[in-house]
Amino acid sequence: MLADRNTLLGCVRSDLNESKRIDKMKTMLVTGGCGFIGSNYIRYILSGETEWKIINLDKLTYAGNPKNLSDLESDPRYRFVQGDICNIDVVQPLVDEADVVINFAAETHVDRSILGGAEFVQTNITGTYTLLECARECGIDRFLQVSTDEVYGSIDEGLWTEEWPLDPRSPYSASKASAELLAGSFYVTHGVPTLITRCSNNIGPYQYPEKRVPLFVTNAIDNLPLPVYGDGSQVRDHLYVEDHCSAINLVLKSGEPGGAYNVGSDNEANGIDVVRTILRMLNKPESLIKNVTDRPGHDARYALDSSKLRSLGWTPICDYEESMQRTVEWYVSNERWWRDIKDSGDFRDYYRRNYSKR
């Protein structure tokens, strides 16, 4: 009996010590943490960092999937709150708890912004303003706005540096550029220590399968046509999402407040090369390729100069081939995850609206 009592007391002391340790951790508010990049970032932090506990604020729109982080629900360092970043009554108390804010929350698909841009303006601009206003009032240590290379427009040759003028070409990229300008204005006017990262095309686990790479992979698995816009000549850099996560973490720690940082991995490939890579990896025929009418205003090429970020010590781990291989293997191994999404009414409705007349 005495041994049992001592064991019980030991467990209680251990739990109390763990609770005290977690209470002393800094708090990171991650918005949009149930989406593709956000969920990968939360997983990255909790698997490798020891100083942070995380509050994940997500509205759970069509691309926000709580299953992305279901294995972390019992982790005492992780707390999920369902809510809208546009709702100041939800945002204010969470920002007040936080030491830093990382804003992943956004409507992100160019094709959807062409079909209708109102939600992009609301979430990407108004939502960012709400977060910044709360950050100003609460006096947080750092506010990191996750943005995109699409704010630069299109470049025929060479690379964009951070000093390149913004020239967004779609409702999506215009809304992201607007969010950046708000973040910059809050740094200059109010002294909010903002940081901006502009990433290239992310690929990897948990990406909603309406996006190009997971759409091609999952369609190929089912022997369905792979819809390639135009002649497939549009060039993108392909950044493995874990490399993006490490870049965000470095900028959060070492970036200069008020600054922007390009995040690219020099993994350029055009659309037709991407689809052929996927078909090769899945041992599927190129007869599945279906060229469809290009989308309006489709940018021809994105290319980032990431030397500013690399000067802080960042180096991407995955080259193009490994990034694609890891991504393809994940979707092959996690069929239930993406099939549940592709069988949903929202996905089917989007696919019909976007591709039925092409």
Image (cartoon, helix red, strand yellow):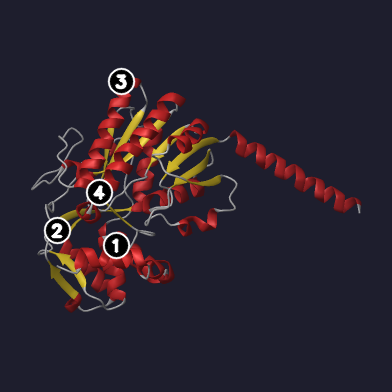
Task: Please tell me which of labels 4 and 3 falls first in the chain.
Answer: 3
Identify the disc placed on residue 295: 2
Residue 136 vertical position relative to residue 355 in the rendered view, above or below: above
- Can you give x and y, in whole percent of width and height, for residue 278 in the image? 25, 69
Mark 4 → mark 1, Cα distance in angstroms: 17 Å
Reading the chain from its start, which is encountered first: label 2 or label 3? 3
Mark 4 or mark 3, which is nearer to you?
3
Identified by mark 3, the residue type is Thr
Name the N-terminal-most of marks 4 and 1: 4
Asked whether the residues under the numbered discs 1 and 3 touch, taking CB atoms below 8 Å apart as contact, a structural biologist would say no
The disc labelled 1 sits on which kind of residue? Glu
Between residue 257 and residue 86, name the one nearer to us: 86
Among the two numbered marks 1 and 3 on one chain, the one whose residue lies closer to the N terminus = 3
Q: Nearer the viewer, mark 2 or mark 4?
A: 2
Distance of label 1 from label 2 (alpha carbons): 15 Å
- Of badges 4 and 1, the one in the foreground is 1
Left or right side of 11 for 74: left
Q: Residues within 10 Å of mark 2 (few under 14, many from 20)?
A: some
- Amino acid type of the residue that numbered disc 2 sits on in the rendered structure: Arg
